């Protein structure tokens, strides 16, 4: 069975490169609905060719979520494969630097983060279908606004809904540089808007009537930043400030947007409570503050179920000649956390091996398309 899958995928290698080139050469920043739809159409056609049923769910302002489902034995829970089709690069980037392959190195916008991961997942499914090795249903969830952290959309809720009941999941983000690395934990993140309401007044004629929202916010920022505890994996970053309309008007409104990182979802909940407690006790009298969580991604916690899944994947990797795996984690948030928080044991970073995400130097190993796809297909075939 192991040789069957590897041999089959080797025969498909040029087709894997061809599909990678096709989707890389479509500009698809998160806010380009036409580009996103074009990539979704290419992926949908491939899914249907394999024998998957496809549908799209509207996620609001930022487009849609593409769902592909491969039927299996009805009593078995599905395997979930997760990824995203959007990139950080603006429209016109493909024209400047389209897909290119030289030796083992592939370049182009989104080549590491993370379009080839979708190719890896699709060809793993194709191998299972063609070799008649799949018993379990497989569901592939591909979102269109991961690079925007699902701002102004309901993608988070769609992933939550679609992954529910999964037996385990693989997130198809890339692995930086080292092919032995796969992800078992990641910090979560959220963007929190803190909005202070004061009272406007002329700063020369009647300053005593004013209540400065900016001064109140300044007091709050000191306290909010002090919530950071890097050793515990908590960081609260006051990344943006807005306020005031003129130098001679006491400002009646000021806002900061907090970038918050946390290691566990319990930490997140405690942080939100502490943020609300800080803003509920103003330093400047007669000011009020509201707190709004604009978007969030759950932390991916290294649970016993995740560790067990990693141990099984590591065993299969060595059996098929991939080599020993290493469980790693990162500071960046990932959609894998949404699945892990819904009791779907998940391994992250099973996409291409590469480097340079979000930069002109982005690159990925062509061979990793084959090796990672073979690893996923072999694991699903053996574990079910």
Image (tube, grey):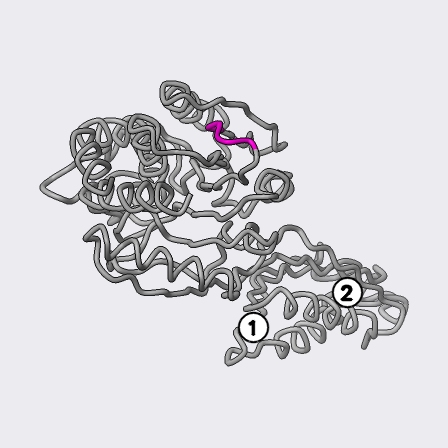
Are the residues at dot 1 and dot 2 in contact (C-beta closer than 8 Å)? no
Task: Say if 141 sits above or below 200 in the image.
Answer: above
Binning the other alpha carbons within 10 Å of mark 2 as few (below 14), some (14 to 19) or many (20 upward) gives many
Q: Nearer the viewer, residue 65 or 88?
A: 65
- In the displayed structure image, the side of residue 335 where residue 280 appears, left or right: right
Residue 232 place in picture, x, y as percent: 54, 78
Residue 70 sits inside the magenta stretch: yes
Query: Which residue bears the numbered disc 1?
Result: 234
Judge depth for marks 1 and 2 and give the one in front: 1
Residue 291 place in picture, x, y as percent: 75, 59
Which quadrant of the view contains residue 158?
A: top right
How far apart are the alpha carbons under marks 1 and 2? Answer: 27 Å
- In the displayed structure image, the side of residue 97 where residue 341 appears, left or right: right
Instruction: Identify the magenta region.
Output: 69-74
Quarter of the rendering occupied by the C terminus: top left
- In the displayed structure image, the side of residue 44 where residue 9 appears, left or right: left
Query: Which residue bears the numbered disc 2?
Result: 213
């Amino acid at each position: 069975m192991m040789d069957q899958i590897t041999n089959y995928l080797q025969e498909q290698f040029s087709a894997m490169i061809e599909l990678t080139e096709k989707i890389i050469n479509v500009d698809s920043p998160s806010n380009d609905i036409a580009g996103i739809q074009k990539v979704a159409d290419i992926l949908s056609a491939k899914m249907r060719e394999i024998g998957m049923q496809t549908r799209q769910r509207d996620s609001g302002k930022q487009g849609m979520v593409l769902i592909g489902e491969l039927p299996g034995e009805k009593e078995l829970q599905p395997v979930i494969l997760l990824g995203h089709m959007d990139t950080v690069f603006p429209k016109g980037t493909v024209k400047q630097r389209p897909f290119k392959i030289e030796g083992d190195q592939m370049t182009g916008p989104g080549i590491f983060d993370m379009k080839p991961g979708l190719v890896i997942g699709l060809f793993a499914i194709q191998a299972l279908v063609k070799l008649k090795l799949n018993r379990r249903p497989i569901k592939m969830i591909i979102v269109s606004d991961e690079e925007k952290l699902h701002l102004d959309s309901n993608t988070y809720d769609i992933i939550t809904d679609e992954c529910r009941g999964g037996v385990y999941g693989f997130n198809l983000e890339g692995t930086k540089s080292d092919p032995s690395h796969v992800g078992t934990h990641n910090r979560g993140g959220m963007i929190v808007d803190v909005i202070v309401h004061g009272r406007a007044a002329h700063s020369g004629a009647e300053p005593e009537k004013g209540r400065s929202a900016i001064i109140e916010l300044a007091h709050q920022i000191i306290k909010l930043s002090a919530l950071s505890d890097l050793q515990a994996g908590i960081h609260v970053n006051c990344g943006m400030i807005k306020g005031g309309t003129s130098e001679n008007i006491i400002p009646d409104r000021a806002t900061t947007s907090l970038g918050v990182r946390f290691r566990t979802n319990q930490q997140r909940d405690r942080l939100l409570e502490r943020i609300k407690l800080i803003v509920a006790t103003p330093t400047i009298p007669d000011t009020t503050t509201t707190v709004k969580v604009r978007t969030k991604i759950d932390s991916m916690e290294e649970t016993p179920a995740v560790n067990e899944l990693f141990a099984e994947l590591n065993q299969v990797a060595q059996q098929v000649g991939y080599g020993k795996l290493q469980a790693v984690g990162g500071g960046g948030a990932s959609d894998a956390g949404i699945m892990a928080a819904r009791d779907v044991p998940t391994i992250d970073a099973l996409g291409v091996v590469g480097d340079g995400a979000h930069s002109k130097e982005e690159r990925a190993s062509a061979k990793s398309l084959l090796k990672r796809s073979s690893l996923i297909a072999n694991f699903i075939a053996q574990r079910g």
